Image: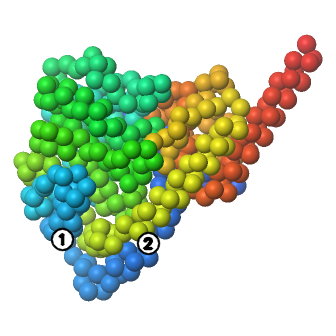
Amino acid sequence: MQICPDKILRIPRSGIREIFDLVPTIPDVVNLCVGEPDFTTPSFIIEQAFEAARKGATHYTSNAGILELREEIAKKYKKEQGISYAPDKEVVITVGAMEALFLALTSIISEGQEVLLPDPFWPNYEAQIILAGGKPVFIPTKEEEGWVLTPDRMRRYLSPRSKAIILNSPSNPTGCVYGPEELEKIARVAKSHSLVVISDECYEKIIYEGEHKSIASLKDMRSGTIIINSFSKAYAMTGWRVGYALGDEDIIKQMTKLQEDVAACASSISQEAALAAMRSGDGATEEMFRQYRLRRSLLLEEIEKTPMISCSSPKGTFYAFINIKKLNQKSRDIALKWLREAKVATVPGSAFGREGEGYLRISFATGEDKIREAFERIRSLMKRSREVVFEKGGDN
């Protein structure tokens, strides 16, 4: 008996999850595959959540979320991006950015419509497009072009069924950041073809080169853009599961309506914690960012010392997308080899689309000692492998 509809069966298993599930079976692994901060949520946020719970914030909220939190989010985007949103009509709080993305796609996609995805991409995008009844269309991006989408290539993948494009800046897995000129070019294509832009801005606070610019802030782009964001990365709140979306009243109204049938509302206590983060969390975010910058520098130094691999400096996020093409093996094979023989967990680039083959994603959201240890192990494995090859060659 077939119990799953075709669209569920079409969703591929995440290559990230494959490695993640193997890690507990191997002792003493240095884990560089986890996509979350290693920092604990700042204590004042935790205390605020406890205090709110003690005062009775343990009930359902409105489907759209606590109004005070929506007001703070609207203030943030007005201050940082110059975009005005009505907090009572154009902001919705969700169960993480994952649900915000699901609500957005489900609200705008009709069966068979196409959603453009720059490749490499976060694999959950593909899954959610399929769940919404859409068809993902993968547009290649290249390391030598900074991993950013070019408008000419974007046009080649458009069709009469194109409905939307997902833009992730800063990007998981590549760490690329779209500058104002690049966004302007994409915006012109999007407007001329009436594409909805879903702008995933979850890593906006982790940028090393340039500044974050939301495509929604460009002329005539606000109404055609749905912003997706989260508290997970900026405030080390992954487990609290609070995200949000901003957009035109018509689309947020539909997303809020759908929220009733998916989750009712985000956790009331988590929303109170997010409110504390919005009001007092800038210092904690800046300190975490300072640590990420140091770790990024260390990681790039370690990559430089390691033969046969290279990496374009990530402009944002806490990921490096390292080039392993000189090893002449599939990325999954290298990831499994490094995991089993060096006890270092990475994610094969093939998990992020066709253009990810030949790369590994490494997370530097971990301590500097672990980064050093990981690369010492990798270099040691490479040395042993070269010695084996040399010994075999000497026998001929």
In the drawing, does residue 50 fall left or right of residue 33?
A: left
* Along the line of sight, the residue nearer the viewer: 16 or 10: 16
Mark 1, residue position: 68
State which quadrant residue 230 falls in.
Answer: bottom left
Residue at the (13%, 54%) spot, across then down:
84
Q: Secondary structure at mark 2?
A: loop
Kindly give the residue lying farthest to the right in the view shown: 395
Q: Position of residue 86 (x, y in %)?
A: 10, 58
In the drawing, does residue 254 fall left or right of residue 306?
A: left
Check residue 85 in the rendering and tell me which mark sits there, or answer none: none
Q: Quick one: quadrant of the N terminus?
A: top left
Q: Position of residue 277 (x, y in %)?
A: 33, 69
Residue at the (56%, 43%) spot, across then down:
362
Mark 2 is on which residue type? Pro
10 Å crowding of disc 1: few (<14), some (14-19), many (20+): some
Q: Quick one: quadrant of the C terminus?
A: top right
Mark 1 is on which residue type? Glu
Q: Secondary structure at mark 1?
A: helix
Mark 2, residue position: 42
Q: Position of residue 381 (x, y in %)?
A: 76, 38
**Disc 1 to disc 2, C-alpha distance:** 20 Å
Please say whether residue 240 is visible from this viewpoint.
yes
